Amino acid sequence: MRKGYITVFLTLSLTLILSLVFTLIEGARISAVRMKFECVADISMNSVLAEYHRELLRQYDLLFVDMSYGGNTADIGNTEAHLKSYMQKNLQPQNKGSGYGRVKDFLAMNTGRVHIDQYSVASDDGGSVLKRQVADYMADYPLGAVIEKAGLGASELASYGLETRDVQAQRRGYEAQIEEIGLPQQEVEEGVFEEVPLNNPADAANATRSSGVLNLVLDDPSQVSAVKISPSDYISHRLLQRGTGICREAVEVSAEPNELVFQAYLFEKCGYYGKEKEESLLQYQMEYIVAGEDTDWKNLEYVAKRLLRWREAANVLYILTDSAKIAEAQAMALALTAVCLCPELAEPVKYTILFAWAYVESLQDVKTLLSGGRVPIIKTSADWKTGIHSIENVRGSLSQDGGGRGLNYQEYLGIMLFLEDPNVRTFRAMDIMEMDIRRTAGNARFRMDACFDTYTADLSVASGFGYSCELSRCYGYY
């Protein structure tokens, strides 16, 4: 039997060596805790973003997380609970064995604090959060085409004052002159006098103004969509849930929002008359963004009336410079006033005929646009479609026309959209998104102001060995 012994020197040496080893092990544990914490934080925060709303992506190519997760309550606390669950699942090993088969947890980590203190919802900053995503999606869109059609069209419209010109006031001024001069009277029987009728065909044309523009320009108005909505159900009419605005990281790396790009995006994703979106609630979505009315009929009618106003202003401008058409109106006015023996009425009657003619031509323009044709903002004699006798039979004189030069219906609609207040345009667009998403399964309570795309989380973990770590990270779709 051999005797063993240990020297004091060796005892002291082993003590120092073991102290060093245990120190290194503990240092490795601390580093491992920090490294695993960072990895788990990255995985968990990305996992939250992986829960993006599928229908919003499918229909509108937007990446947002719905804080309600299809439920009734939209609160960031729901997302905090999801994030905490992902953290805990990734921190603790899934040991299914027992005894020697179990893996010893070297770190013994548990989730501590999970708090989301900043998050950007779609409607923050007047919808700028939404529009930044749109700008990223449309990064390669040829902006020049949009500027040419919408921007330049709006400039031309403004240069002629078509949006502000009050043609009806001018027309009523000439009608007032006729009333002021008055018609001569003739004795129809002894002691009974009546005015000699003027039989001005402009009166018949103006009488159709109360019929409604859609009833005049559409062959079958009954085919117009009858969908009705309750505006108070949607984001532009309710009190908003707010986030904390666009985060700094997103501003640094995302494309700058551009209203013309946003307008191009809306035409790509939304329907309008003649190009309706199959799965939409409102059939005339772009018209809703322009008009904001509660029915498809009212929205289309608003656009048609505005088109008629623009066209009538433009056509009056043109017809008053066309000597041939002025001569035709002059000849008709002289004939009418000669019959009623009141030649002094010839001048105001001439102008009422010219204004009525421009009105009928404008109805023809709107019909042409709704039929898929084109109409220039300012016409030449070659572009004029109606004859002077069209004012005697307005309905019968309008014809289906899908040709011509100039701008089409979409481009005129684009000018209206360009002239709309950006904030109004953005929130009505989000109304449309809510309408369409709510039609899909499990999304009956979907809200755009409950959707976030970027968030900052303050996280902490604790180790069973007495250590804790904290960090703050910002993650989003940028």
Image (cartoon, helix red, strand yellow):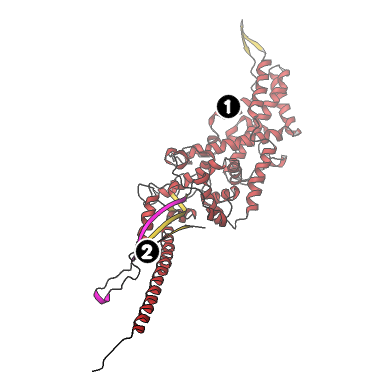
Where's residue 47, x and y in %? 41, 61
Q: Please, is residue 135 above or below residue 311 in the view?
A: below
Q: Quadrant of residue 34?
A: bottom left
The label on residue 207 is 1
Position of 69 compared to 127: left or right?
A: left
- Report if residue 399 is visible in the image: no
Helix, strand or loop at label 1? It is: helix
Classify 136 as above or below 153: below
Q: Position of residue 377 (x, y in %)?
A: 67, 41
Q: Earlier in the sequence, mark 1 or mark 2?
A: 1
Q: Residue at x 71, y 29 (%)?
A: 329
Nearer-the-camera pick, 123 or 98: 98
Name the spot of residue 437 as percent of width and height, x first: 43, 49
Identify the residue position indicated by label 2 in the image. Answer: 467
State which quadrant residue 37 falls in.
Answer: bottom left
Describe residue 476's horizontal placement relative to residue 88 as left or right: right
- Which quarter of the image is occupied by the N terminus? bottom left
Q: Is residue 6 magenta?
A: no
Residue drawn at the location 42% of the way across and 40% of the way down: 233
**Which residue is drawn at the image coordinates 59% and 49% (left, top)?**
258
Front disc: 1 or 2? 2
As helix, strand or loop, the secondary structure at mark 2 comes to: loop
Task: Point out the stretch of residues depicted in magenta.
Answer: 97-119
For label 1, the crowd category at 10 Å Cα-Cα, with few meaning under 14, some 14 to 19 and many 20 or more, is few
Q: 143 or 20, which lies in front?
A: 20
Q: State whether residue 222 is above or below residue 356.
A: below
Residue 461 visible in the picture: yes
Q: Is residue 104 magenta?
A: yes
In depth, the one of 241 and 136 nearer the eye is 241
Which residue is more in the foreground, 417 or 449?
449
76 with respect to 336 (left or right) = left
